[in-house]
Amino acid sequence: MQRQDATADADDGALMQRVAAGDARALELIADRHTPMLFAVAWRMLGDAAEAEDVVQEAMTKAWVKAASWTPVGGGLGGWLRRIATNLCIDRQRKRAFVSDAEIPERADESPAADVLIDEARRQAAVAAAMQALPDRQRAAIVLTYYEGVSNAEAAAVLGIGVKALESLLVRARQGLSRSLVQMGMLQEGSAA
Amino acid sequence: MSQLDQMLGGYAPPPVPEGLAARVAAAAIQEPQDRGMMLPWRRGSIRGGWRRGTLIGSAALGLAFTSAVAAEVASGGRIEIPVVHQMVEAVPILKASVHKQKPVQLASIEPRHGVPPSQAVEPSSAAAVPEEPVAGTPRERFIAKFTEAKKEVAERRAAGLPTPYADRIERKAKRMVERRQAAGLPAPSLDEAETRVAVREWVANRILRRVANNSQGLTDAQIQRFVRILPPKKREQFLALGQEEQGQAMSQLAQRVLARRMQAQAVDGAGPAPDTRPTDVAQQPTEGSPDQPR
């Protein structure tokens, strides 16, 4: 029992060393720690719980397969997994782009009718629709910096761009969100700033 | 906080499905793990890997091209790489350095041993410079030596010295030309016929010596070559034998043929002793050094 507690308290670096040695228990602990974060990132990026689960699954599989090549730099294991998940989400969004529009219902249409929603749920559906209307990289920039609290430098590294480019993405993302929400009547024009 | 930030703050994900962490961990461990550190040149699965591969490929191509140009320029044009050569030709500075050949000092020909200095012929410019470069194969080297030897034979004849082997080759070549002319077949020139006869004898002698000295370790290729020089009737008898018997038969036959040839040379009275191998192509055109086993 003591050993199990010690294992649970081990830091990510030690756990990854054990994962690299083929320790399944260590991977379970890592999954326990990071699955909520990965699921949140994936859900906000994709707007779909089933797809978010798939992304978490793929990210964890990569962590297991590539454990030997992981080095504790940058944002640590969390940063590495977040980067994997973000890139998997962007890949999925790009694949979606090749599918016919007819197969993808509009996000706004998915939300229940406004008159039967309580205000909170209605607002959330509107934000979800606005988020999904953003280009992939703008959405990733918002998710990483706003929701995950990642620094601009780290988010820029995840997206493979410079900090200035990330800041530009963020500005355009906020403008896009404001525009969408104003069009949906959820936001008054000029109140976004 | 702006109204937009307030709205974004309300965009919360649903709760994590129960047991998701355990499920993803259980599924992940089914996959085989990569062992060892990922090498830099095998990072194709990583984002941007194609860019790295392209860069490495371009660098390698550039290096190969630079090396090819350097090789051609440094070799003074001896090494010609087709595409590179065309480009080098197009650049005046490179072209000049490529075509700058070093002057070649020709070796002077010393008079042969045993020939009185008065009978030694002055080497002509044509004799000093070989008409064709000596090629790499033993056969080509033999032909080159034979061509050189014919000049020396001419000198010996002019000096009144005997040239029994050259005479024999000449007789055989004449007979060959006459036979072909009589049969209405296209006949080679006498020079060409002499070269053919000499090469044929050289090949036959080489095979005979090898076979006579080594009946056990004969290869299939040696047997095939030996079969080619046999007359049709003997060829059939020979092919009917087993492999070991073939080796013994080849060895015995080769020894007999060699002995007969040596006897014939001894009867001519000008040949070398049977147990010595002539090394002078002028004296023995068909037994020159190119047939040394390699």
Image (tube, rainbow, N blue to C red):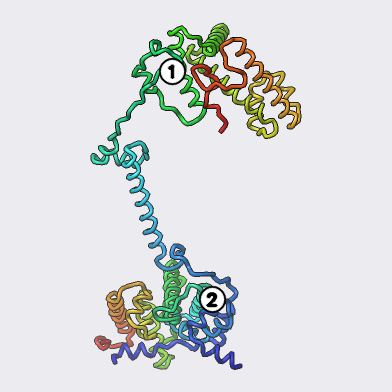
The residue carrying pointer 1 sits among few (fewer than 14), some (14 to 19) or many (20 or more) residues within 10 Å by Cα, namely few
**Figure label count:** 2
Mark 1, chain letter?
B
Find residue A124 and report its image quarter. Answer: bottom left
Which residue, given by chain and number where applicable, does mark 1 sit on?
Answer: B112
Nearest-to-viewer mark from 1 and 2: 1
Mark 1: secondary structure: loop
Front in this rendered view, residue A90 or A134:
A90
Note whether B291 is above or below B194 in the view shown: below
**Quarter where residue B256 is shown:** top right
Element assignment for label 2: helix
Q: Nearer the viewer, residue A25 or A169?
A: A25
Q: In which quarter of the image is the N terminus of chain B?
A: bottom left
Question: What type is the residue that disc 1 sits on?
Answer: Arg
Q: Quadrant of the C terminus of chain B?
A: top right
Expressed as whole percent of the image width and height from the top left, the position of residue B216 reads 70, 33
Residue placed under numbered mark 2 in the picture: A20
Q: How far is the residue under mark 1 from the one under mark 2?
A: 81 Å
Q: Is residue A126 visible?
A: no
With respect to residue A171, does B115 lie above or below? above
The one nearer the camera, A149 or B150, is: B150
